[in-house]
Image (cartoon, rainbow, N blue to C red):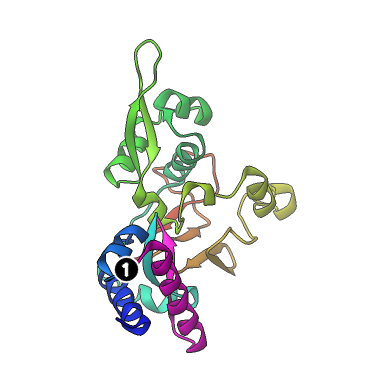
């Protein structure tokens, strides 16, 4: 079998997969292929897409490969959505960030950071499969531990948790209220996000189906105060 045939098979498998396909599985599905060869095939496909100026690329997301459109087409793709996108309040975003950076973490530890009851918000994150139960803390009472899921990585366009920006990087990305006159973020927002700013709304348009983060002038009445991010609209996955 020629490299061209293997490359076409890899492209078909990634395109047809409903979720990121791991490198090892991709290699097993392609005849006489090793993981190293499969990675080379993906690199060759992406090189072809760049040369042909295609509107999509193969991204390494959540431990696997997935076909995603470029960020500049997010505005058009959102018009195809027939269902209401997932929305997260600022309280949910703050809680999710705490779990992501401190995992595995207990509910009490989350509440200690936020200063408010986190039960309802954490239930919402569990229902939306952004966090999961990951065991129990070995202390009296054995409280449950929470961690982020593969879905979390997929939604936020991360190959692995190590790709989360460091706290120092976050400080550089998010200006203080003294610098901006308010708590809204106006600078670039990390790898994989293209920023578009308009008046009081900042849209972070990313490769579909990465999230689109918007910050409106009015605070979500159902959310606890504490962070400036209001909603996360998560588009679907057109192929």
Which residue is labeled 1 in the image? 237
Q: Residue furthest right?
A: 179
Pick the front one: 24 or 46: 24
Q: Position of residue 14 (x, y in %)?
A: 31, 70
* Magenta stretch, residue numbers: 33-62
Tell me if residue 122 comes above or below residue 180 in the rendering: above
Q: Is residue 149 above or below residue 112?
A: below
Give the x, y percent position of residue 12: 28, 76
Residue 208 seen by the camera: no
Above or below, 171 relative to 156: above
Q: Quadrant of the N terminus?
A: bottom left
Above or below, 87 relative to 94: below
Q: Residues within 10 Å of mark 1 (few under 14, many from 20)?
A: some
Looking at the rendered structure, the number of numbered marks drawn on it comes to 1
Q: Residue at x 48, y 59 (%)?
A: 213
Quarter of the picture holding the C terminus: bottom left
Residue 229 visible within the image: yes
């Amino acid at each position: 079998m020629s490299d061209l045939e293997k490359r076409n098979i890899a492209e078909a498998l990634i395109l047809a997969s409903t979720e990121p396909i791991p490198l090892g599985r991709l290699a097993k599905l392609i005849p006489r292929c090793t993981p190293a060869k499969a990675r080379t095939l993906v690199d060759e496909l992406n090189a072809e897409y760049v040369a042909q100026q295609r509107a999509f690329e193969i991204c390494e997301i959540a431990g696997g490969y997935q076909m995603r459109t470029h960020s500049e087409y997010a505005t058009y793709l959102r018009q195809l959505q027939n269902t209401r996108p997932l929305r997260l309040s600022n309280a949910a975003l703050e809680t999710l960030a705490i779990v992501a950076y401190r995992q595995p973490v207990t509910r009490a530890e989350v509440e200690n950071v936020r200063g408010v009851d986190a039960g309802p918000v954490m239930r919402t994150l569990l229902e939306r499969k952004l966090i999961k139960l990951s065991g129990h803390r070995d202390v009296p009472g054995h409280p449950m531990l929470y961690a982020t899921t593969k879905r979390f990585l997929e939604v936020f366009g991360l190959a692995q948790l190590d790709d989360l920006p460091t706290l120092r990087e976050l400080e550089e990305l998010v200006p203080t209220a003294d610098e901006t006159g308010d708590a809204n973020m106006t600078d670039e927002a990390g790898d994989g996000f293209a920023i578009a700013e308009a008046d009081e709304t900042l849209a972070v348009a990313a490769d579909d189906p990465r999230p689109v983060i918007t910050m409106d002038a009015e605070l979500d009445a159902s959310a606890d105060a504490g962070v400036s991010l209001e909603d996360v609209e998560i588009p679907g996955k057109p192929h």
